Image (cartoon, rainbow, N blue to C red):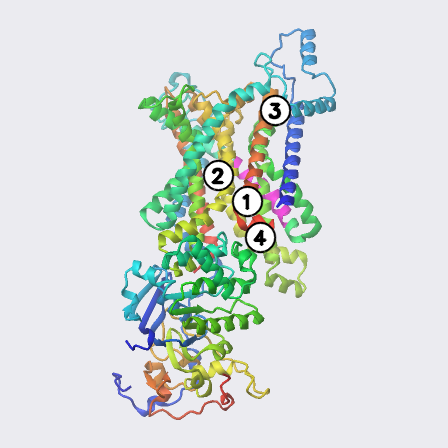
């Protein structure tokens, strides 16, 4: 494992057993996270990004979830093989997580203070008084006004944005090396979204934490990420630095994503073009490229075989048949060409 | 990248027309709501057992009394309290009456009372809940105040009082049970109506100019149906229990008519000497309650959309 | 919260008043005089007795007097028990009934909780299946059938425990079990459902993501959230216990209120019926009220806001 990497996910496969059969939610996902980096994992709902993130924390309920294959290397340890007891020592201490909906992810019958203190008591072996002191400090750090009185309040007394701040306080209490934020701003008002993102960026610098940001919002990506992993139907279709993905996306799906996002840097007449169709059913994923049925540039081979991942530059990798030397050359849709918005 | 097993040929890289691609998507099995309900109900072994038991018991309650030659009221003082004699399959009671016949006759009466009581529930509860929930506002407010007061009154007390007053008979017992039972039904229906009213499709239908009548019959009632069915499935065994319970404390229907409760009460009097006289009606009563509860549970689980995957 | 309590208290009083009034007028419009069975009493004596009980006065006057006396804890005198006061009879029967009820509640709640929790945590295992079968049986077999069977088999056939009267702790075992089974069944079902619901909540994921062990996550986060709503079961539970005590006390010949009530129904001792009815109603209504308030106190979401969101 590369010493600069905090996390390496290699060929991860996760499935769910349902009444209808086995849903292959994640089908061979690989990416790595460098120290101090923010990696954004983007894709439509159901593309497997949340499953991937919860697999890293081993939070997938089993059953119905099944870990099929792959490695998740964190500081040289394969998390998939760790005994549960050791995994507990990593959760909350080295890897922490923030969930999408702050309305439901806090325990309604426990005070905010106690919920922050729990991790501290467990991992830092702090006494009650010390833990409370630290919890106060965390509340102050995440910008909750009058933390002294807020610490003894219950979640329902907090607004949505405040709750997400409290969630961040819980997650960062033990100064984790890696923070996984699963759509941390999706459930919030637009005005609050920016505040939460700023807070996360700010704390990332302060605490020297690496972040995996799961989102379907490219605006959020542009604002926070260093690198981007684009997922589609349980697979990584393209990865690259945020500049590469926004300036020179190579996968037609990424083009589609870009085309369906409003951008300030392009002319106002540019129309948004939705990606037609729907992602394939992962109960019986197609044998070829999963995007083939929606791809405007699909070729015969796309339906037959899954393309391999190829290096487009030192940092950008794409899984698309258009990269093949025999493929016709296809231009990036011209309306996507513009400056990256970062 | 050329480690692929298949050899690459240029024609593989010809573009494909888009419309052929559209057909490629794997269509997921379409499951209708009721189809889904049935699918899940069928998987529930307990519920199926309940249905089976109910069918058997219902059939026997109808034809059972006529299978042998005895009438439920015919006494025969030659053969009193005999556990097995001739074709008295369940034996005879203290007056020489056939217990098999009386048990199934009693089961029929018990079921009849329960169905009547549930009928009363529906008759009062559904309109009450519909009106309260559909109109809302002041009407709802007042109707709810009434419910709140009535809901606080213990059912048992009202039933006992009413039966002391009415003198127990099939109709009287069913009425007493219905008078107390409709409140639950009204609450369920009102709750559903309120929930539905706030839903988009109802608003859509209303915007399109659907009449109140049409709204109620075409859009809302079908959706209220599930919870109503579940409530019915649980109010029937409750009614059967209460009927038997009342008989056991001396408020059952009068002889020579018999319900399961009356038979159990009679059997209880001679329990030490002739336990079999209590056993059969008690078994049938318990089986009826069990079946309804099993089916009710099964339906509730099947209809609960939270469990839909 | 204060407003809420006041409002609930008002409803409680209205409900009680409705019951008292209903009871009074139903009892006084019963066909026949309370003394109908004592035909041989001379007319003058009968009139004298009626006068003594105040039954010769107009109904409204009697009603006002009745309410007045009720306020002072005077429920009138029994017709049948040599003119003893109803209040005295109730106080005499209450301790045994209370002890029985508390024992059954304690046993029932404890085992119900355990069973429900284990079933939910081991969902789909044999423990879960057994618990489910047990609770649906406990739900379905009527308490008087269960009590009768226990009395007959454990008491009479095996002779392990006394089956009648009330002379010591061992006398309360069988009746307590008879009552507790339904409590266990109700509690286990309820807790299982609540627990499963809670286990699927997002905050359980948060708890695990903090690094808490499954055990800590359950005891610190799941249990409290699953148990709080269980308080609401206490109201219906008291009703169940009262219903049960009527028959169980009769079956085990326990000199409690339940038996007295059934007895008074059978001999139509109207003042006792009225008195006990009112007492039971008050007990149930006050319990429901207390449960509501208690729920408000232990659930922080209600504690402050007044209404659950």
Chain where mark 1 sits: C
Camera sees residue B201 = yes
The question of residue B121 being in magenta is answered with: yes
Q: Which residues are magenta?
A: B113-130
For label 2, the residue is B237
Task: Give the Cα separation between the discs numbered 2 and 4.
Answer: 23 Å
Quarter of the image where one finds residue A10: bottom left
Mark 4 or 1, closer to the camera: 1
- Return the residue nearer the eye: B38 or C156: C156
Q: Residue at x 57, y 48 (%)?
A: C303
Chain where mark 2 sits: B
Q: Residue at x 28, y 76 (%)?
A: A1
Residue contact at pointers 3 and 4, CB within 8 angstroms: no
Camera sees residue B307 = no
- For marks 2 and 4, the one nearer the N-term is 4
The question of residue A342 being in magenta is answered with: no
Residue A246, image x, y percentages: 46, 84
Q: Main secondary structure of the magenta part?
A: helix
Q: Quadrant of the N terminus of chain B?
A: bottom left
Q: Vertical placement of C226 versus B258: above or below?
A: below
Disc 3, SS: helix
Task: Give the Cα separation between the discs numbered 1 and 3.
Answer: 34 Å
Q: Vertical placement of C41 versus B212: above or below?
A: above
Q: Quadrant of the C terminus of chain B?
A: bottom left
Residue C141, image x, y percentages: 42, 35
Task: Give the Cα separation between the discs numbered 2 and 1.
Answer: 35 Å
Quarter of the image where one finds residue C9: top right
């Amino acid at each position: 494992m590369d010493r600069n990497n905090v996390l390496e996910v290699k060929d991860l496969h996760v499935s769910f057993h349902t009444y209808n059969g086995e849903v292959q939610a994640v089908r061979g996902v690989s990416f790595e996270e460098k120290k101090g980096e923010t990696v954004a994992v983007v894709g439509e709902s159901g593309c497997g990004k949340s499953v991937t993130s919860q697999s890293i924390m081993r939070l997938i309920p089993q059953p119905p979830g099944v870990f099929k294959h792959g490695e998740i290397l964190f500081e040289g340890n394969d998390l998939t093989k760790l005994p549960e007891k050791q995994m507990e020592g990593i959760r909350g201490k080295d890897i922490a997580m923030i969930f999408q909906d702050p309305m439901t992810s806090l325990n309604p019958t426990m005070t905010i203070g106690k919920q922050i203190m729990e991790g501290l008591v467990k991992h830092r072996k702090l006494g009650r008084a010390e833990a409370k002191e630290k919890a106060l400090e965390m509340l102050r750090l995440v910008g909750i006004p009058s933390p002294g009185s807020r610490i003894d309040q219950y979640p329902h007394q907090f607004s949505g944005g405040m709750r997400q701040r409290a969630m961040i306080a819980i997650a960062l209490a033990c100064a984790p090396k890696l923070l996984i934020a699963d759509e941390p701003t999706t459930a919030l008002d637009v005005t609050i979204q920016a505040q939460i993102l700023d807070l996360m960026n700010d704390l990332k610098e302060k605490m020297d934490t690496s972040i995996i940001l799961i989102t379907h919002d490219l605006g959020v990506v542009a604002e926070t990420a260093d690198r981007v992993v684009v997922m589609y139907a349980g697979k990584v279709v393209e990865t690259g630095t945020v500049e590469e993905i926004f300036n020179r996306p190579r996968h037609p799906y990424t083009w589609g994503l870009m085309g369906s996002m409003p951008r300030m840097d392009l002319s106002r007449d540019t129309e948004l073009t939705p990606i037609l169709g729907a992602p394939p059913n992962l109960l019986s994923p197609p044998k070829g490229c999963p995007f083939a049925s929606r791809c405007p540039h699909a070729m015969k081979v796309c339906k037959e075989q899954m393309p391999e991942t190829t290096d487009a530059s030192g940092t950008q990798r794409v899984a698309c048949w258009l990269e093949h030397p025999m493929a016709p050359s296809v231009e990036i849709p011209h309306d996507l060409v513009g400056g990256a918005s970062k | 990248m050329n480690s692929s097993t298949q050899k690459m040929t240029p024609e593989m890289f010809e573009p494909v027309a888009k419309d052929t691609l559209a057909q490629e998507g794997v269509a997921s099995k379409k499951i209708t709501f009721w189809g889904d309900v049935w699918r899940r109900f069928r998987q529930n072994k307990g519920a199926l057992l309940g249905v089976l038991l109910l069918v058997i018991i219902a059939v026997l309650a109808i034809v059972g009394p006529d299978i042998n030659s005895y009438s439920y009221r015919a006494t025969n003082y030659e053969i009193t309290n005999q556990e097995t004699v001739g074709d008295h399959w369940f034996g005879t009671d203290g007056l020489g009456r056939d217990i098999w016949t009386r048990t199934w006759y009693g089961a029929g009466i018990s079921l009849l009372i329960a169905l009547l009581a549930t009928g009363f529930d529906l008759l009062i509860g559904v309109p009450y809940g519909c009106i309260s929930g559909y109109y809302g506002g002041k009407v709802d407010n007042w109707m709810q105040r009434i419910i709140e007061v009535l809901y606080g009154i213990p059912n048992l007390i009202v039933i006992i009082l009413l039966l002391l007053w009415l003198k127990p008979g099939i109709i009287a017992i069913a009425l007493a049970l219905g008078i107390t039972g409709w409140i639950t039904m009204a609450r369920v229906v009102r709750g559903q109506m309120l929930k539905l009213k706030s839903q988009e499709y109802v608003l859509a239908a209303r915007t399109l100019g659907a009449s109140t009548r049409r709204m109620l019959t075409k859009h809302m009632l079908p959706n209220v149906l599930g919870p109503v069915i579940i409530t019915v499935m649980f109010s029937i065994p409750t009614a059967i229990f209460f009927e038997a319970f009342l008989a056991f404390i001396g408020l059952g229907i009068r002889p020579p008519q018999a319900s399961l409760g009356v038979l159990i009460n009679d059997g209880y009097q001679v329990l030490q000497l002739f336990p079999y006289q209590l056993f059969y009606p008690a078994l049938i009563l318990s089986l009826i309650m069990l079946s309804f509860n099993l089916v009710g549970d099964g339906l509730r689980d099947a209809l609960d959309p939270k469990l839909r995957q | 919260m204060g407003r809420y309590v006041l409002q609930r208290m008002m409803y409680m009083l209205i409900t009680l008043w409705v019951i008292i009034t209903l009871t009074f007028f139903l009892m006084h419009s019963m066909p026949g005089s309370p003394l109908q069975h004592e035909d041989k009493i001379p007319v003058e004596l009968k009139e004298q007795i009626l006068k003594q009980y105040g039954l010769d006065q107009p109904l409204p006057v009697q009603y006002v007097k009745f309410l007045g006396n009720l306020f002072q804890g005077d429920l009138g005198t029994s017709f049948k028990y040599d003119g003893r006061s109803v209040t005295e009879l109730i106080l005499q029967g209450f301790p045994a009934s209370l002890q029985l009820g508390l024992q059954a509640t304690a046993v029932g709640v404890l085992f119900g909780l355990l069973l429900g929790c284990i079933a939910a945590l081991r969902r789909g295992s044999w423990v879960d299946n057994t618990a489910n079968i047990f609770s649906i049986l406990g739900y379905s077999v009527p308490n008087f059938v269960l009590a009768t069977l226990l009395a007959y088999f454990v008491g009479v056939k095996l002779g392990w425990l006394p089956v009648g009267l009330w002379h010591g702790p061992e006398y309360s075992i069988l009746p307590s079990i008879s009552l507790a089974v339904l409590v266990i069944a109700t509690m286990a079902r309820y807790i299982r459902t609540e627990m499963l619901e809670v286990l699927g909540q997002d905050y359980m994921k948060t708890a695990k993501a903090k690094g808490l062990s499954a055990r800590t996550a359950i005891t610190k986060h799941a249990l409290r959230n699953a148990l709080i709503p269980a308080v609401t079961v206490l109201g219906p539970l008291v009703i169940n216990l009262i219903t049960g005590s009527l028959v169980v006390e009769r079956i085990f010949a326990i000199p409690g209120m339940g038996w007295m009530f059934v007895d008074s129904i059978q001999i139509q001792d109207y003042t006792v019926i009225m008195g006990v009815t009112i007492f039971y109603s008050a007990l149930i209504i006050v319990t429901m009220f207390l449960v509501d308030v208690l729920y408000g106190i232990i659930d922080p979401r209600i504690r402050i806001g007044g209404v659950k969101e």
